[in-house]
Image (cartoon, grey):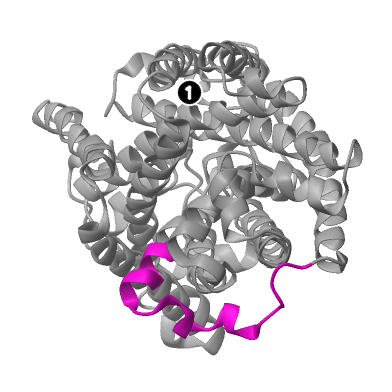
Amino acid sequence: MSHTTPSGKTSNQARSDEHQLKAGAINLFESSIMALAGSAPSYSIAASTAVLFGAVALGGPAALLYCGVAMFGIVFAFSYLGRVEAHAGASYSWVRRALHPTLGFLSGWALLVSTMLFVVFASFPAGSVTLGLFSTSLANNVTAVTIVGSIFFLLIVGVVAAGVTITTKVQVAMSGVEVILLVLFAVLALVHGHHVHTFSWNWFSPSIFHGSTGFFGGALIAAFYYWGWDVVANLNEETKGSTRTPGIGGIVGVGIVFILFEVFTIGTNLVLSAHTISANAGDVLVVLGQAVWPGFGGKLIVVAVVLSTIATLETSLIQLTRTLFAMGRDGTMPRGLGKLHPIRRTPVIATLVVAVIGIALFVGANFIGAIGSIFSDAISAMGLQIAIYYSLAGLSVVVLYRKHIFRSVKNFIFMGLWPFIGSVFMITMFIKTIPTLNSTTLTVGLGAMALGLIPMTYYWSKGNPYFNMPTKLERVVRVEEVHEIERLL
């Protein structure tokens, strides 16, 4: 199925060999693994548990539950949007068609800045956790952490540049080991004989937040936990069944990490005290591992963290490079970013640009301040940016499918109601948390978004066709498109 692009050509016509990624390289199983790796269960737990506990105390399971329900609405939105068009820019293209070109561009920009921030700060645990296996003092040495983290980052850039086929094979191996280790330690935490707290169903109750501010503050952090699964959407041009498989892969991946996040957060509440969590903000999983399996066995959880960090750095780099590639191909960023390696079919220029900027930011960030405070501010800042492009995607599917939402109960729930609830949740979370955030978080979160106005204004003023307003006909999924979608399913 072909679709009209801003230039007036069909997508198949517009994408010449020069701009055609390696099609059919990823299957459904690999797509599901990529979604799981994108959410990075071990990394998210290790990096965010102390931040989440500091925001909602024992209410972590509730924050992850309610944000998870809303997140599934966004997952369904991406699934239906992807059935209309396979585009490496994903929401950058879909939001343009449904809502407005400026919102489409800002949606893509939100992904770029949030992912670049993540790539920088995700390299912290890659260095510190690895060095922690050998020496506690080295793990707290900024210079050592910077060197090891940079090595990890550059190695991962090399894997991504080698091609999506190699990347997915590496992901399957790493994520398989990671999940096995997480399940093992989750069981150990639940059956551990020395629980600090007694399990309570109140951990899932909205009342545990003591007001909407606490509720949405926890949700902002929980959104960071889940974020990253949508890498499958940016890989849609390279996936078998490009308009169907990524959506299913996203649903499967988020379902798995939802269970893992809940079980581990419950286990942490049971085993670790508030003092232990706050005193070990950078290595909560390591402490938990030693609590449930003292000695060498407890260190195995570090392997899961390292693998998860590598895996999510890979998926983040994929999202960055594919989004930059799509924008370069459309001419809304420098066109050189849209060039591919002639053999490997990977965005070679975009990958090089990301590598240079990423290393520069990572080295600089390591010397700004305490790692704990950087993590906290960065997670909240990324949460704001995530809320922007997820909420726009949720609204887009409702707009594009508005003539089909009431044709069946299934359509009403999965095309309309659930994505709309997810979008409203993200918008409300964004608005409610703004007054509670410090100036650093707001500057990084919203200031980085404001920078996107510069390239947007420049390329709009140059008359780039991406910024032409879609016609009324383009802003609704046509009956024949729905029939084609149903035939493919």
Label 1 CA crowd tier, 10 Å (few <14, some 14–19, many 20+): many
- The answer to whether residue 489 of the structure is visible from this angle is no
Give left or right: position of 211 versus 306. left
Give whichever of 149, 284 is nearer the camera: 284
Magenta-span inclusion, residue 212? yes
Looking at the picture, does residue 109 appear above or below residue 213?
above
Residue at (29% x, 18% y) in the render: 334
Look at the image and give the residue range highlighted in magenta: 195-219
Name the spot of residue 379 as percent of width and height, x first.
Answer: 42, 45
Question: Hey, which residue is sitting farthest front in the picture?
Answer: 275
Which residue position is annotated with label 1? Answer: 19
Name the spot of residue 292 as percent of width and height, x first.
Answer: 84, 54
Quarter holding residue 281: top right
Give whichever of 96, 182 is nearer the camera: 182
Residue at (55% x, 55% y) in the render: 226
Looking at the picture, does residue 352 appear above or below residue 139?
above
Q: What element carries label 1?
A: helix
- The answer to whether residue 38 of the structure is visible from this angle is yes
| Amino acid type, label 1 | His
Magenta-span inclusion, residue 93? no
Give whichever of 302, 196 is nearer the camera: 196
Give left or right: position of 149 versus 292. left
Where does the C terminus fall, quadrant-wise?
A: bottom right
Residue at (41% x, 21% y) in the render: 338
Residue at (22% x, 62% y) in the render: 472
Total marks drawn?
Answer: 1
